[in-house]
Image (spheres, grey):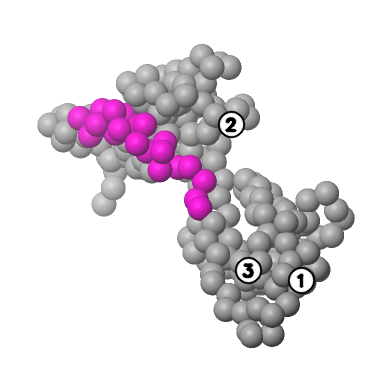
Amino acid sequence: MTSKIKISIPEPCHENWLEMSPSQKGRFCSNCQKNVIDFTKASDREIVLAYNENENLCGRFNNYQLNRDLIITKEKKSLWVIAAASVIAFLGLGNQSAKAQEKPKIEQTDNKQSNSDSATKTNSDKEIKQYNGVVYDDTKMPFPAVNISIKGTKNITQTNFDGEFSIKAKKGDILIFSSIGFNDIEIKLKSNSKLIVKMDQPTLMGDVNIIKSAEEYIEF
């Protein structure tokens, strides 16, 4: 027999996760005086067990973990004891999980310059040139319709269906990559004109609300 459970964050917190102080179970928010647990790597069972331990839970989640039904199969008592032990271990390692959720580093491919480019490198560093690249999401799939702009200007473009983009800029300019629901990424341009960018997985933080369905049914 199973029961349907749905989790949500009615009022998302807009505090900066990376600026919070690390704590034993995640990070501590000085604004609301609460420990925020990082559930972005947690299973459905771990989330529910943590909520059962503390109904006033405040957590950090991926968008896809929210506003959907979690199906938690009822198990024998002995197995629930084992599961409870696993969630305790998960909460104890929250600090390590939080560290793992820092913004991914942006990798850039090497771009071999031709002899003619090398000869004019000193004079062309500040000249406008074409910068090309590809933007990926957290699943390593090409990310279309990402806005790319040069900071402080109205120069803007978008990635195509294959996540590719091209923009004219100069060394030292800052490119801003943005998409609804994702964290903005800023890159200061160097001599390398080929860029590979990975967008952050969108996350939400705040007090957790869990709704248990009154309907229960038997699995066949």
Q: Residues within 10 Å of mark 1 (few under 14, many from 20)?
A: some
Mark 1 lies on residue: 124
Question: Is residue 96 within the magenta segment?
Answer: yes
Gap between marks 1 and 3, in whole Å?
Answer: 12 Å
The residue type indicated by label 1 comes to Ser
Q: Count numbered badges in the picture.
A: 3
Q: Which residue is located at x 78 percent, y 51 percent?
A: 151
Residue bounds of the magenta highlight: 85-105
- Farthest top residue? 33
Question: Judging from the image, what secondary structure is the residue with disc 2 in?
Answer: loop
Q: Residues within 10 Å of mark 3 (few under 14, many from 20)?
A: some
Mark 3 lies on residue: 192
Q: Residues within 10 Å of mark 2 (few under 14, many from 20)?
A: few
Question: From what the image shows, is residue 217 above or below residue 142?
Answer: above
Question: From what the image shows, is residue 202 above or below residue 11?
Answer: below
Report x, y in % for residue 11. Answer: 61, 27
Query: Which of labels 2 and 1 is toward the front?
Result: 1
Q: Earlier in the sequence, mark 3 or mark 2?
A: 2
The residue type indicated by label 3 comes to Asn
- The one of 203 and 99 positioned closer to us in this rendering: 99
Question: Judging from the image, what secondary structure is the residue with disc 1 in?
Answer: helix
Question: From what the image shows, is residue 8 above or below residue 135?
Answer: above
Query: Which of labels 3 and 2 is toward the front?
Result: 3
Please, what is the dominant secondary structure of the magenta stretch? helix
Q: Is residue 11 left or right of residue 68?
A: right
Report x, y in % for residue 152. Answer: 83, 49
Residue 187 found in image quarter? bottom right
Q: Which residue is located at x 54 percent, y 17 percent?
A: 30
Gap between marks 2 and 1, in whole Å?
Answer: 39 Å
Mark 2 lies on residue: 16
